[in-house]
Image (cartoon, rainbow, N blue to C red):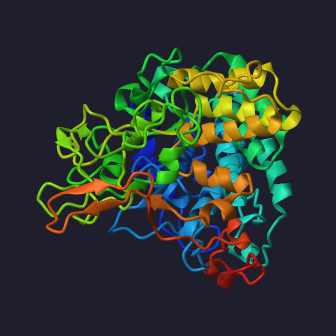
Amino acid sequence: MKLKYISIYLFASVTLLGLSSCNDFLDKYPEEELSDASFWKTPTDAEMFVADIYRRVMPGDGNGDIDGDINSDNAVHGIKWAAGNVSKGVYDPSNFGWSGDYGAIRACNKLFENIDNIPDYNETEKKKVIGEGKFLRAFLYFGLIQNYGDVPYIDKTLDISELEGITRTDYKEVYKKVMEDFDYAIANLPEQWPADKYGRITKGAALAMKARAALYFKDYQVAADASKAVIDSKQYELFDAEGTGKYAELFWESQEACSEAILVRQFKAPEKTNYIIGWGCFPTKGWGGINPTQSLVDAFECIDGAPITSSPLYNGTEPFSNRDPRLEVCVLHDGEVMYGETIKVAPLKSSGNTGIGQHNDATATGYYNQKYLDPSIDPQGAGWDMGKDWHVIRFAEVLLTYAEAKNELSGPDASVYEAVNRVRTRAGMPPLQNTNATLPTFAADQETLRQRIRNEWRVEFAMEGSKRMWDIRRWGIAKEVLNAPFYGLKYKMSADGTSCELYVGEPVKLAGSRYEDHNYLMPIPQTEIDLNPSLTQNPGY
């Protein structure tokens, strides 16, 4: 079901709100906008208004953050694409913006200020709409303090004259306000909406996002409690929880409304404007823009639960054999057949090569992304687009959030193992345990289990946007991870260019990064500082 709730009101809400693209501080609406007195008349008006905030925060077109992993050690851009600015540490105050977030925040504040003017509005229904707005405002402010640290906290609509002199609020105070908004949403949103309103924010989504924010800021008790509330609600379950080998289908269009989906960014059919295939698919079916690194490939354990560095099952000449099944779901490699084409990444000069250096969309690492490639959707027939909803939060994140937060609070206990092992079991991997030290899955102390949980985050959510980037930042290891060399496959080609062989165990070194301590925060956009000199710049920019 595709965005029925939002799409019903899209044209009307765009017209009523007079939306435009603005670079001014707080993304101000035009002065000629429809007056509040003439708009806030019926409950439908409020629903139209909040529907447009949804559209602004989670628009139904674009690429769904499919290329977010290039800002981590999981992936690099293909040969013809620029490197990820975040991972390279090359952002400056001129190339990162925030005005769109503040424009949506202003809309949330306008909703709160005007909704009580609507007569005869059922109190329960009104609180649901306010709860949606509170969630969206919290979601936006959480993203802002993740990116910038201290930011202006605005909880009312401001006139132009009031914008001058706005200063940054300590991120810890903003975080408290974020938690308050999430708590209101949790208290007033339903656990489920009717089928014709699929996609609207639920109590479970508010709890899960609260848990994500708390985990990021190391508020472990809050993260554990919120994630446990989602688990205990029994509203969600892992897709293919028993591990029958259907994990790949979780990322296909046929399963977009499955039991694992907690919060999704919806992409509408028949337009199918989610550009996942175009960005990530191999040439000639796509642009080959997202190339997994050797580091990511090596992070997937062997099926005995041991890393490749210690497992007797690992064979360097057949590196994809006996591996975590999620590796094949995530990474497309030489010799695989996809969409009727055999993937060839060796640098041959002969025709038919899709790989390193022989095509404008070639892979830089020897690998392509495979996650989200639905075999039932031909990329060329679909125009490289698809209608698959993008997972903003899925239940696996909640389980790993609980496992990490509980382990950080008090070390391993039965509930930690249960949570992380539900994710591993679904993937077809053996459970972590603390009873048999002879097995490679033994993880009895806090630090060992911490590292295993961190690796589980990496392999479970690889190629799913910016999750890895945020993980290494909240763990404080971004500088270490991103400044290490990035590697891909290395081949030796014959003199005539007609044959080659893989250098087993000798990867090719790719371009490095220069990530510094100040890169943990983004620069405040220079245009905003120029408009309001009371805004100070983050250190290092």
Q: Nearer the viewer, residue 114 or 26?
A: 26
Expressed as whole percent of the image width and height from the top left, the position of residue 454 reads: 67, 41
Q: Nearer the viewer, residue 129 or 332?
A: 332
Expressed as whole percent of the image width and height from the top left, the position of residue 62 reads: 40, 53
Q: How many marks?
A: 0
Q: Looking at the image, can residue 222 be seen?
A: no
Which quadrant: the N terminus?
top left
Which quadrant: the C terminus?
bottom right
Expressed as whole percent of the image width and height from the top left, the position of residue 349 reads: 16, 64
Q: Most extreme residue toward the left, as rendered?
A: 351
Q: Looking at the image, can residue 537 be seen?
A: yes
Q: Residue at x 39, y 56 (%)?
A: 489
Expressed as whole percent of the image width and height from the top left, the position of residue 477 reads: 71, 57
> Viewed as shown, does residue 449 lie left or right of 299?
right
Q: Quadrant of residue 166?
A: bottom right
Position above or below: 163 against 87: below
Q: Nearer the viewer, residue 426 or 99?
A: 426
> Viewed as shown, does residue 235 lie left or right of 329?
right
Q: Quadrant of residue 476?
A: bottom right
Q: Quadrant of residue 431?
A: top right
> Viewed as shown, does residue 291 lie left or right of 281?
right
Q: Residue at x 74, y 48 (%)?
A: 216
Q: Most extreme residue toward the right, as rendered?
A: 410
Q: Residue at x 36, y 62 (%)?
A: 364
